[in-house]
Image (cartoon, grey):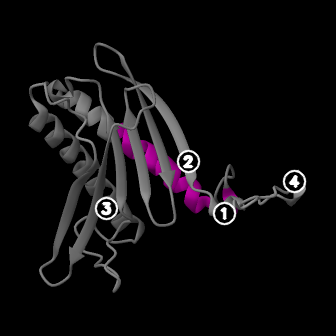
């Protein structure tokens, strides 16, 4: 007994259309990096429960996927950044400098998370060093940060200047997305000041 299936056809008007409020805020930006003018694409998606940022020089490939969870403790006034690689190291086993490239990616994600936490504290009207504390459900001051890092081979030779340009560009993209996300009905309109 082979099950049979009957496909029904639906009018386009009957198909499910998500409301715009259920879709993530999404931005894409391309920059050139360094003396070699390497084209680098940055993608931001702000979901209700996650922040996703992709930095790629690999023709749109995500590269390694890293997750950063931020926890704050009001007991000892500390902030902890837990960065772990979810998918891929982005380093071929035959290439040298693999540990260094993985470390650069982890430092990049941590630096970006630190900047987003500082922004969040400012938006709560407190100083950059004030601990907001986590919610009772264990969430930190920011939603988990998921970052795809796809840099060209040899990124372990990334200069400090290029590293900082990438962090600044990703943070600028995040800030633009944050403003769009929090503008509500005021998108494209001037405020009272």
Sequence-first tag of 3 and 4: 4
Q: Position of residue 31 (x, y in %)?
A: 42, 26
Q: Quadrant of the N terminus?
A: bottom right
CB contact under 8 Å: marks 1 and 2: no
Q: Which residue is mark 3?
A: 117
Q: In the image, is 142 to the left or to the right of 98?
A: right
Q: Residue pushed farthest front?
A: 1
Which labelled disc corresponds to residue 21? 1
Residue at x 34% of width, y 75% of height: 139
Which class describes the residues within 10 Å of circle 4: few (<14), some (14-19), or many (20+)? few
Chain-order first, disc 4 or disc 2: 4
Residue 180 sits inside the magenta stretch:
yes
Q: Main secondary structure of the magenta part?
A: helix
Which tag, 1 or 2, sits closer to the chain's start?
1
Tag 3 secondary structure: helix
Choose between 171 and 5: the one closer to the eye: 5
Task: Please give the label number shown on residue 9.
Answer: 4
> Mark 1 or 3 closer to N-term?
1
- Most distant residue in the top direction: 36
What residue range appears in magenta?
168-186
Disc 1 + disc 4, Cβ < 8 Å: no
> Can residue 193 be seen here?
no
Disc 1 or disc 3, which is closer to the eye? 1
> What secondary structure is found at the residue carrying circle 1?
helix
82 is within the stretch colored magenta:
no
**Can you give x and y, in whole percent of width and height, for residue 90 in the image?**
25, 35
């Amino acid at each position: 007994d082979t099950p049979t299936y009957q496909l029904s056809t639906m009018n386009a008007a009957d198909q499910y259309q998500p409301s715009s409020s259920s879709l993530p805020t999404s931005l894409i930006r391309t920059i050139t990096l360094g003396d070699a003018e390497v084209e680098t694409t940055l993608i931001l998606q702000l979901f209700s429960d996650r922040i996703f940022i992709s930095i790629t020089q690999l023709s749109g490939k995500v590269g390694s996927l890293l997750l950063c969870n931020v926890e704050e403790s009001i007991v000892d006034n500390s902030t902890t950044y837990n960065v772990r690689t979810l998918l891929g190291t982005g380093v071929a086993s035959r290439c040298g400098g693999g540990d260094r490239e993985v470390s650069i990616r982890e430092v990049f994600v941590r630096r970006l998370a630190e900047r987003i936490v500082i922004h969040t504290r400012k938006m709560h009207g407190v100083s950059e060093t004030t601990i907001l504390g986590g919610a009772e459900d264990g969430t930190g001051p920011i939603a988990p940060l998921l970052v795809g890092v796809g840099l060209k081979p040899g990124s372990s030779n990334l200069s400090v200047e290029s590293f900082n340009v990438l962090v600044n560009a990703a943070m600028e993209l995040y800030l633009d997305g944050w403003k769009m996300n929090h503008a509500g009905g005021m998108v494209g309109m001037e405020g009272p000041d």
